[in-house]
Amino acid sequence: MFRLARHGLRWRRPYSSVAASDIEHFKTFLPPNAILTTLSPSNLASSELDPFNNDWMGKYRGQSTTVLKPKTTQQVSDIVRWCASREIPIVPQGGNTGLVGGSVPLRDELVVSLANMNSVRSFDPVSGILVADAGCILQSLTDYVAPHNHIMPVDLGAKGSCHIGGNVATNAGGLRLLRYGSLHGSVLGLEVVLPDGTILDQLTSLRKDNTGYDLKQLFIGAEGTLGIITAVSILTPPSPQASNNVILALPHFDNVQPLYRTVKRQLSEILSAFEFIDRTAYDLAVKHSQGRALSDEDVEGAECFVLVETSGGRREHDEQKLEDLLSSLFDEETPLINSGVLSQNPAQFSSLWALREGVTEAVSKEGKAYKYDISIPLASFQTVVDTTREHLRSKGLLGDHAVKHVLGYGHVGDGNLHLNIVAAAYMPEIQDALEPFVYELVASYRGSVSAEHGIGAMKTHALHYSKNDVSIEWMKKIKALFDPKGIMNPGKVLE
Ligand code: FAD
Ligand code: 2HG
Ligand code: ZN
């Protein structure tokens, strides 16, 4: 488990811990089943709070004694107002699928789980504007808008657990960013409980609204450090009439860039995803039963794979374009690809996606992962993976009892590489070998230390690799303005 000191996290203030008298106060406006506490006179075992204290990777662990599960915005406001008066720090928690330790307490902060705020408030099938409570699970919203022929503009492997509020709080990227852009564009409005308990109602459903500062943008990607998002208004795109996908096996990573150019040129408006997994990632996905393995012939000699998805208006037209693409790729004197496996039906479509989407799950089954979610030039993806592996080898850390695998996968279209180091266990020697090594490598490309997962608790000390002093200073001023008592998710994003 990670200790505060390892990350240089500071606990600057003499915060209060939740006390039995606070629980008595919460009972005045919350029903008994909305209060989970190990404080006397409750007889809840502390292990019953494990799902809230432990993060998805089993890397970060808090010691919260109390989790509150409000059902209304007013209840969230009443909780926060009380905590502000008592200086009790709060961790807003969605589906707890975050990968940077932002969603769990560092110490014994109060956890406010949005899980019970899970109703759709409205949906307009003409405009496609959806207004939903922050605790709605992403998959349930996808299912909600599907009969109205719409889809969510964001999609990710954690869709069965993550909340739309968590997606907005982390400005999640995911698998559809290439087509639908970032949440900074598709979120139209937010309702937020500010750190003093005030309800900020910016839940508008307007496509255009140029009336001064766009405050909601501050909460998108703030990782719960500026307030608790209680509802989201979001533009959902119409469902494509047809979606197809193909997995392409490449002999060398060097072919990814020319392939991307060719695919963009030939598929143009119907290209909706261009995702990359290296050979190690593919092998792990197959080993841990994420999707169906391709045939031996299809994977022979492949150094990496690319998943291409199309989403368009006419199936025959899109299929024709994909087939034309494949034949033109094979017609080249030196083909960029070894093979291409085209899905023929919805089951195969999902199975090909599972090979890509399932890598995170596969990695977690294989061992303990150190995850670096970085933006770097596409041409350097493989170099960064290889350089990191060689660095670990030079330190004598490669092997079954230390680092088992170093792999790369990610969103080519977004310039976002997921560098994963899978180890037998979390060990200080590995951590020390990886940091600041990886961050310095990223900085040498003028990249970002967080493309989409955020800063959380993991990277507060690394923020300066991607943000200059002036930017960090202004981030701190904004934090102090919204949250002068520093109770909202302390120790996350900013040190
Ligand atoms: P949590 O993990 O609960 O919280 C994340 C952060 O947001 C915390 O700092 C928390 O305090 C804050 N927060 C949560 N809810 C609120 C709220 N209502 N108000 C204010 N703050 C809040 N991420 C990507 O960007 N792209 C991917 O493709 C992707 N794929 C993933 C695949 C898997 C298998 C897993 C496990 C994770 C993946 N992630 C991905 C990371 C993660 O799922 C996303 O960051 C997601 O958006 C987090 O949502 P959540 O509801 O689980 O939030
Ligand atoms: C993905 O793109 C997610 O699959 C998770 O962002 C990446 O686990 C990771 O490192
Ligand atoms: Zn990702």
Image (tube, helix red, strand yellow):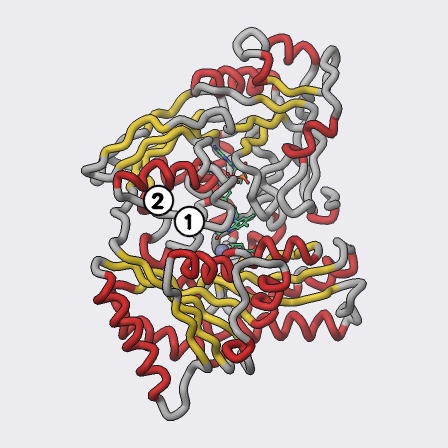
Decide which of 221, 287 is in the foreground and name it: 287
| Left or right of residue 179: residue 416 | right
Secondary structure beneath label 2: loop
Residue at the (62%, 25%) spot, across then down: 110
> Is residue 120 toward the left or the right of residue 49 in the image?
left
Residue 152 circle label? 2
Asked whether mark 1 and ligand 1 are closer than 8 Å, the reply comes as yes
For the residue pair 409 and 433, the one nearer the viewer reads as 409
In the picture, the quarter occupied by the C terminus is top right
Q: Which mark is residue 155?
A: 1
Image vertical order of residue 404 relative to residue 49, above or below: below
**Amino acid marked by disc 1:** Asp
Do callouts 1 and 2 mark residues in contact (Cβ within 8 Å)? Answer: yes
Q: CA distance from mark 1 to mark 2?
A: 7 Å
Q: Where in the figure is residue 94, as x and y percent of width and height?
A: 52, 34
Q: Quadrant of residue 55?
A: top right
Look at 36% across and 28% down and name the residue there. 120
